Image (cartoon, rainbow, N blue to C red):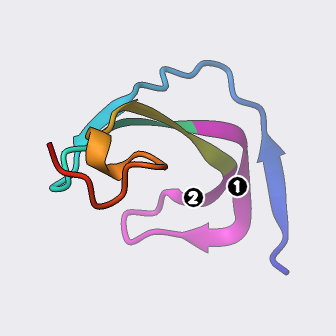
Amino acid sequence: MIDGSDVPIAESTDRWSELKLEDGTVMRVKPNILSAVRIDGQYDNEGNPAYAIKGNQIVSIVSTPDHLKQGNQGKIQ
């Protein structure tokens, strides 16, 4: 455990990243930041305070090739 101070988020501009996988799947991913914590007594090489974030990610499948869908494994058209 490390001591830290919660820092409220004043503004956020979370954007989606779109990924095209080699198997043909296209997905979108976006971070969902829940909170930020400034770590007491920790700094980077430039003297900036260190932070940790609490969050998760949202994943949305935009498209998937038919042969990868359930019930279609092995059927390439």
Q: Position of residue 3 (x, y in %)?
A: 84, 70
Of residues 40 and 77, the one nearer the viewer is 77
Left or right for 77, reference 50: left
Amino acid type, residue under disc 2 in the picture = Pro
Q: Is residue 42 found inside the magenta-colored segment of the image?
A: yes
How far apart are labels 1 and 2 at the CA level? 7 Å
Looking at the image, which residue is at 34% across and 51% down?
A: 68
On screen, residue 3 versus residue 9, left or right, reads: right
The quadrant the C terminus occupies is: top left
Q: Residue at the location (32% across, 38% down)?
A: 64
Q: Position of residue 1 (x, y in %)?
A: 85, 81
Depth check: 31 or 22 in front? 22
Q: Residue at point 61% right, 57% down?
A: 51
- The residue range painted magenta reads 32-54
Identify the mark nearer the N-term, 1 or 2. Answer: 1
Question: Which residue is labeled 2 in the image?
Answer: 49
The residue identified by callout 1 is 38
- Left or right of 77? Residue 57 is right
In this rendering, the answer to whether 9 lies above or below 24 is above
Residue 23 x/y as whole percent: 20, 54
**As drawn, is 48 to the left or to the right of 46?**
right
62 or 72: nearer the eye?
72
Label the magenta part by its dominant secondary structure. strand
Labels 1 and 2 touching (C-beta < 8 A): yes
Instruction: Work out whether 69 lies above or below 73.
Output: above
Q: Image quarter for residue 74?
A: bottom left
Helix, strand or loop at mark 1: strand
Q: Residue at x 81, y 62 (%)?
A: 4
Q: Amino acid at mark 1?
A: Arg
Residue 21 position within the rendered picture, expressed as x and y whole percent measured from the top left: 21, 51
- Near mark 2 (Cα within 10 A), the count class, few <14, some 14-19 or many ≥20, is few
Give the quarter of the image for residue 10.
top right
